[in-house]
Image (spheres, grey):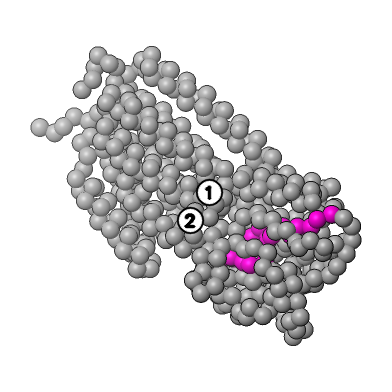
Amino acid sequence: MMPQSSPSTAPAADATQRRLMAGIVVVTLLTAILMIVDLAIGGRPDPAPLRAASTLLDGPWRFHTGDDPQWAAAGTDDSAWETIDMTAPPGSHDGDVGLPDYVGGWMAHGHPDHHGYAWYRRTVTVPAGSASWDILGPTLVEDGYELYWNGQLLGSSGRLGPDPRLVGTRPLKFALPAGVAGTRGVLAVRTYMLPGSGASADGGGMHTPPILSPRPASDALHRAQWQRTIAGYILDAVEPAAMLALVGLALVYGARSSRKGFLVFACIALVLTAARRLNNAIVAWTDLQDLVTYTWLASVMWVPTMTAWVLAWNRWCLPAWRSVDALAVALGVAGIVGALAHLPVWTSVSRLGSLALFVVIVARIVRGGPMRVLALVTLVSVLTTLFGPELLDTIGVPGIWFPFNIGVARTQYIYAISIPLLAFLIVRTLLPRNARQ
């Protein structure tokens, strides 16, 4: 005898479900308001008085590929070096966070295949007066740098040398030596780009020029830069926290759920997704994770995440199909092999095969799954986060929007929808206390 399909509608919500759903709505609205406020603050232009008191070190810089520690010295003859103009077009910004004063890197200036070291140098005149002066480091460099004043190392982003350790570039402030007011000096920037990185046509080296600024204007300008950087990645911290809150919701109320198998694998998928997204904020805000580790995780973690979501949704319509489970695991193995061995064919087979399994699951839900509409809308939102290139790139949906001049990825918009939908779905699977199975 064939098993009966689950009913397509759910019983009316009980008091616990109504309270939980009301809480989901309130938390979602409050979080959205706070995120909008943070984006609006971070996206404001640098205050005009601070910029007026400071000097953006754009214009021509001397440039040379390769590496020689002597190039930091003030007396180095750089007359035969190339010249790169660091003047940004009006209104230009990078395509990720929205950092202002963006210019193309060395790959757009005649070095499309260069990776490794390169140096920038220019003479800087420090205005006379009693103020102490700082250099605000470039806010976007591929992938790390050291900053020198007349041969003296002021500081760095990451660690260069025989065993480089590169981290995400963030706002840094370096104090110039005492007594520099009213003098001229040579500012040298030693940059390093990881082999294999920077696939874009304008990658490599400095993308934003440093800023010469007196105190206390430099402190305020540095804070403004950090506000922009925090706003650029705030959703990569808040949305993972919301995903982990969903896991907590499932753990607290999972015993009452009519879809325990779905919750188990959905929790695994949510934890993996949260880790993937949180990595962006960790790299952008701290030195805890180097770029090599970040790149490796980004290339591999999507595979178990995708597999966990297939296994979860296969358990929405009972009974779960063992054939779908087996194919999902096999495709996951293929994806791992493709990512680690750099085999794009295997990666494509894994992604397209998993997408085909989701199509089968969608068909099952349409035919008779519980809470059909809510489940379908939630599943589609999850699919668009997993398969953006296949589903959204083909119809021309941009990968990043810039509300308030801060970049917000389309997956972040979709997570803002899918997270409360998943919360509602989890709550609606809860059985009344007197009807536990």
Q: What type is the residue that disc 2 sits on?
A: Gln
Q: Hey, what amino acid is under mark 1? A: Ala
Q: Is residue 274 left or right of residue 396?
A: left
Q: Which residue is pictured at 63% across the width and 49% down the height?
A: 229
In the image, 251: left or right of 212? left
- Where's residue 339, x and y in %? 37, 63
Looking at the rendering, the stretch of residues picked out in magenta corresponds to 131-147
317 w.r.t. 54: above or below: above
272 in relation to 125, above or below:
above
> Compared to 252, does 35 lie above or below?
below
> Residue furthest toward the left?
1
Q: Residue at x 82, y 62 (%)?
A: 179
> Badge 1: few (under 14), some or many (20 or more) residues near its Cα, within 10 Å?
many
- Measured in 3D between alpha carbons, the distance from the residue under mark 1 to the one under mark 2, in whole angstroms, is 10 Å
- Determine which of the numbered discs, if any, sits on residue 289 in the image: 2
Say which residue label 1 marks. Answer: 281
Residue 143 in magenta?
yes
Kindly state the secondary structure of the residue where label 1 is placed.
helix
Q: Quarter holding the N terminus?
A: top left
Q: What residue lies at 68% left-to-right and 79% top-to-bottom?
A: 71
**Which mark lies nearer to you, 1 or 2?**
2
| Picture coordinates of residue 29, whole percent (x, y) | 56, 28
Asked whether residue 397 is in view, the answer is no
Is 410 rendered above or below residue 27? Answer: below
Quarter-of-image position of residue 106: bottom right
Q: Position of residue 98 (x, y in %)?
A: 66, 52
- For label 2, the crowd category at 10 Å Cα-Cα, with few meaning under 14, some 14 to 19 and many 20 or more, is some
Choose top left, top right, bottom left or bottom right for residue 342: bottom left
> Is 258 a magenta residue?
no
295 and 390: which is toward the camera? 295
Taking the spot 46% from the left edge, 41% from the top edge, the residue there is 240
